[in-house]
Image (cartoon, rainbow, N blue to C red):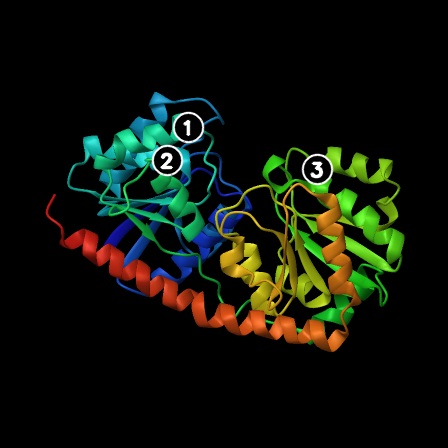
């Protein structure tokens, strides 16, 4: 049994956090004993892991503040749990994992980069200068891989593309949920757009809300459901009111019934300014939702333009709204065909079991290398 420590910046709701959760569920049935450490206080994903019998620690760090006590605590956890591999996710956890290599040289360190934008050139250089402390570096999209190689943060021979995976048993269309969700949210038979993601600058919700205002000028019988929490939530509620669309936008907060909401929707929309490879796009396609999203990062690796969805120019409300309207003007049969195409593509390329097999192969490769 290989004791593997998953080190992540936080365990609140997000694509990286959900991917770690799904990976752990798959790996615990193999020859691995997963232990999870969050730099920040444990959030909803951490609580779900604990409920399922996974050991979860928090270093209780404050966002944006270094902590010597956190380093000491993590050292103790590594010794106590007899860790063989540290697999870190997101920038701060990646750097801390590499620091641990100095204290535990026999422990293998695998880092995963989850976004094309990790916070600027200084952070990219910090990765570059500490790459020697990592035994394996992975990235979740080809677009992000090309970026990090181009800026010199990681060499091509060291950086391995290993995509997100989606649990196709969980994310599938549930026709029985459609009527229930629509009835509970009082949506009637109107066209339903769904967006899922935290409320921060990256997701550019002002762009989405302005685009949806244009949509409502043409298609009044439609709603926009937004699932997520974050620092900009209240600001976006105010913006919806200012745009006079508040009666047609539902801010649903944190939800655990995403597959049900996706089954109830007619289309999925994403307005991000940058991305790595959004897990939520994999999930929406897996359910069979046609997608309209900005052409940033790895989005084009998930959404095949005019086949499984529509890719639009980022930071452009007119482009986003025009393509949302284009999707709405398709017949129900055309949208269903687009959704089916997306479903088949995701199941062929991004099925979670296939991705977990790739992780298993990488871990075995790393373990076979001498320190």
Q: What is the spatial separation of the Cα atoms under label 3 and label 2, in whole angstroms?
A: 33 Å
* Label 2 neighbour load within 10 Å: few <14, some 14-19, many 20+: few
Can residue 1 be seen in this snapshot?
A: no
Give the label on residue 233, or none. Answer: 3
Query: Is the residue under label 2 in contact with that under label 3 (CB below 8 Å)?
Result: no
Query: Is the residue under label 1 in contact with that under label 2 (CB below 8 Å)?
Result: yes
Nearer to the camera, 114 or 45: 114
Q: Is residue 99 above or below residue 139?
A: above
Q: Is residue 267 above or below residue 5?
A: below
Disc 2 target residue: 151
Q: Residue at x 26, y 31 (%)?
A: 130
Which one is earlier in the sequence, the residue at label 3 or at label 1?
Answer: 1
Which one is earlier in the sequence, the residue at label 2 or at label 1?
Answer: 1
Nearer to the camera, 289 or 325: 325
Residue at disc 1, secondary structure: helix
Disc 1 target residue: 121
Q: Residue at x 75, y 47 (%)?
A: 318
- Left or right, 78 with respect to 139, comes to left
* Label 3 neighbour load within 10 Å: few <14, some 14-19, many 20+: some
């Amino acid at each position: 049994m290989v004791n593997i420590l998953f080190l992540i910046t936080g365990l609140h709701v997000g694509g990286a956090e959900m991917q770690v959760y799904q990976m752990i569920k798959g790996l615990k049935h193999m020859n691995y004993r997963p232990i999870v450490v969050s730099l920040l206080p444990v959030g909803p994903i951490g609580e779900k892991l604990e409920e399922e019998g996974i050991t979860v620690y928090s270093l209780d760090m404050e966002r944006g503040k270094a902590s010597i006590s956190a380093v000491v605590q993590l050292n103790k956890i590594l010794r106590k749990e007899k860790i063989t591999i540290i697999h870190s996710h997101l920038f701060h956890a990646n750097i801390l994992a590499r620091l641990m290599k100095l204290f535990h040289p026999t422990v293998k360190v695998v880092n995963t980069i989850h976004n094309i934008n990790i916070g600027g050139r200084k952070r990219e250089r910090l990765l570059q200068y500490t790459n020697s402390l990592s035994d394996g570096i992975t990235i979740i999209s080809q677009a992000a891989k090309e970026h990090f190689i181009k800026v010199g943060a990681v060499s091509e021979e060291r950086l391995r593309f290993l995509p997100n995976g989606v649990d196709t048993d969980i994310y599938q269309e549930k026709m029985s949920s459609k009527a229930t969700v629509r009835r509970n949210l009082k949506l009637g038979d109107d066209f339903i757009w769904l967006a899922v993601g935290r409320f921060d600058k990256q997701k550019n919700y002002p762009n989405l809300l302005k685009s949806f205002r244009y949509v409502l000028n043409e298609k009044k019988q439609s709603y926009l459901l937004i699932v997520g929490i974050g620092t900009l939530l209240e600001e976006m509620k105010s913006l919806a009111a200012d745009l006079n669309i508040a009666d047609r936008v539902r801010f649903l907060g944190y939800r655990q019934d995403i597959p049900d909401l996706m089954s109830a929707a007619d289309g999925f929309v994403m307005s991000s300014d940058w991305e790595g490879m959004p897990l939520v796009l994999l999930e929406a396609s897996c359910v069979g939702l046609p997608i309209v999203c900005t052409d940033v990062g790895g989005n084009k690796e998930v959404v095949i333009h005019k086949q499984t969805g529509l890719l639009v120019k980022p930071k452009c409300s007119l482009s986003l709204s025009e393509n949302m309207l284009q999707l709405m003007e398709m017949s129900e049969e055309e949208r269903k065909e687009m959704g089916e195409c997306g479903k088949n593509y995701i199941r062929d390329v991004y099925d979670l079991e296939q991705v977990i097999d790739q992780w298993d192969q990488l871990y075995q490769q790393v373990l076979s290398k001498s320190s």
